[in-house]
Image (cartoon, rainbow, N blue to C red):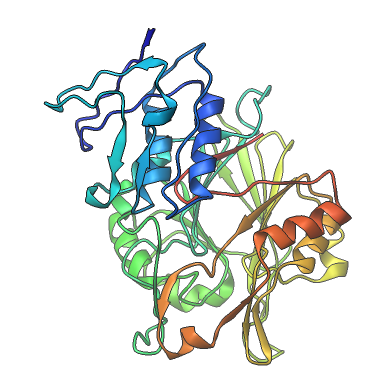
């Protein structure tokens, strides 16, 4: 009978956990995440090599703590000797997590990680993508931390909270203070769901010289806040220097026109790793010009895949347009974002309808581009590529 090493993290409620291999933990957490609110049981069968680490603990902690339910692992760990620590009671081999009582912030997901593949490079040509819900991301590219369209203070309400008010579903308590050191803020659009003043104002007070790369449409909003803002028109580039002397290149592409036809388009971006071996395309509305984007290349595409529709108007595209985008860019990976998946209320929120699912997108992608992989991000959990 094998004893299982237990982990005690003082800053979190003292809980009991056992894990097997890293791959099994990832499989378990994926299993749990797809069965929210169904009281799932995690099946752990491999009794060979046991391992524990803060990373593994926090991965499963954050997966489960997003669900107000109880997970019973007891029936699947009869082959293990489980000993509680600092609990004062015997669990008799049954591990239960009364998750509704957990009040700890789900902020340490940033120390968790899921590796898509092992990188054989020196580490500079990798992307670590952490989805922060809505349109917000934290990207680590070759050691450079890029904060994208951040909404980390208050809700999203476009200044009209009686008509629209939206909050995050999972990372409700994630704050600016939970971020690592940021090298650059990337702003795609000038509207509140991308250029969120309730977040950017305190961020600028803390870091007034922080580098910001943005659409020129946001100039009236950003100039009063930051002293180091670079406004990129489509086709223009900027670079961020890494600590080891390399550079991460950011090039703007044309995004949607949010206004009259003569208005300047908002931005998408192509981000290229320091050695130029890996590139990422991001535009949060899945709006693009076929001819222009067909001249670009990006290994990774981050795009919405579920359409968001108003009567007679498409707010956010996806589905077949997302497949076509991956095809035009000759991409290897698609990272679908669910930027409409928020806890929203108000008259305007009730008018927005969704069209399609991630599963229907996967079916379209498999039919059209069978070699392209879909990598679903979990809020707060870094996704490593490659």
Q: Is residue 112 above or below residue 165?
A: above
Left or right? Give the position of 106 relative to 362.
Answer: left
Q: Quadrant of residue 18?
A: top left
Q: Quadrant of residue 226?
A: bottom left
Left or right? Give the position of 149 relative to 334.
Answer: left
- Measured as percent of width and height from the top left, residue 188 is found at 57, 66
Whether residue 142 can be seen here: yes
Left or right? Give the position of 49 relative to 15.
Answer: right
Front one among 77 and 30? 77
Q: Quadrant of the N terminus?
A: top left
Kindly give the residue lying farthest to the top in the view shown: 1
- Measured as percent of width and height from the top left, residue 332 is found at 78, 44
Kindly give the residue lying farthest to the left in the view shown: 88
Task: Residue at 22% x, 22% y: name it.
Answer: 84
- Measured as percent of width and height from the top left, residue 312 is found at 68, 92
- Measured as percent of width and height from the top left, residue 58 is found at 38, 35
Task: Residue at 46% x, 46% y: name it.
Answer: 183
Front one among 220 and 302? 302
Task: Residue at 57% x, 63% y: name it.
Answer: 338
Q: Quadrant of the C terminus?
A: top right
Q: Is residue 122 above or below residue 268?
A: above
């Amino acid at each position: 009978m094998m004893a299982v090493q237990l982990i005690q993290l003082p800053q979190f409620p003292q809980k009991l956990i056992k894990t097997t291999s890293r791959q099994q933990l990832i499989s378990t957490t994926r299993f749990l995440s797809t069965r929210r609110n169904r009281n799932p049981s995690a099946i752990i069968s491999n009794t060979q090599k046991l391992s524990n680490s803060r990373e593994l603990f926090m991965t499963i902690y954050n997966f489960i703590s997003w669900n107000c339910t109880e997970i019973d692992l007891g029936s699947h760990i009869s082959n293990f000797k489980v000993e509680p620590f600092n609990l004062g009671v015997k669990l008799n081999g049954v591990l239960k997590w009364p998750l509704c009582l957990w009040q700890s912030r789900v902020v340490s997901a940033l120390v968790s990680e899921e590796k898509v593949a092992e990188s054989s490079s020196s580490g500079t040509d990798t992307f670590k993508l952490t989805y922060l819900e809505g349109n917000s991301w934290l990207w680590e590219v070759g050691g450079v931390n890029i904060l994208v369209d951040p909404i980390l203070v208050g809700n999203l309400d476009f200044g009209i909270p009686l008509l629209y008010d939206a909050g995050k579903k999972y990372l409700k308590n994630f704050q600016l203070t939970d971020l690592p050191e940021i090298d650059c803020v990337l702003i795609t659009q000038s509207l509140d769901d991308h250029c969120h003043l309730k977040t950017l104002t305190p961020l600028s007070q803390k870091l007034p010289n922080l580098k910001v790369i943005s659409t020129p449409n946001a100039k009236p909003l950003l100039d009063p806040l930051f002293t180091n803002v670079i406004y990129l028109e489509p086709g223009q580039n900027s670079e961020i220097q890494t600590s080891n002397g390399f550079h991460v290149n950011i090039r703007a592409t044309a995004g949607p026109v949010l206004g009259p036809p003569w208005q300047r388009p908002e931005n998408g971006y192509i981000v290229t790793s320091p050695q130029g071996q890996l590139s990422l395309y991001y535009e949060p509305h899945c709006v693009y010009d076929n001819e222009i984007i067909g001249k670009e290349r990006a290994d990774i595409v981050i795009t919405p895949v579920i359409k968001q529709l108003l009567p007679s108007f498409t707010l956010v595209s996806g589905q077949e347009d997302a497949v076509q985008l991956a095809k035009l860019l000759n991409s290897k990976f698609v990272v679908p974002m669910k930027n409409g998946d928020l806890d929203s209320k108000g008259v305007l929120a009730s008018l927005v309808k969704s069209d399609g699912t991630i599963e229907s997108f996967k079916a379209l992608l498999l039919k059209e581009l069978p070699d392209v992989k879909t990598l679903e991000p979990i809020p707060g959990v870094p996704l490593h590529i490659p």
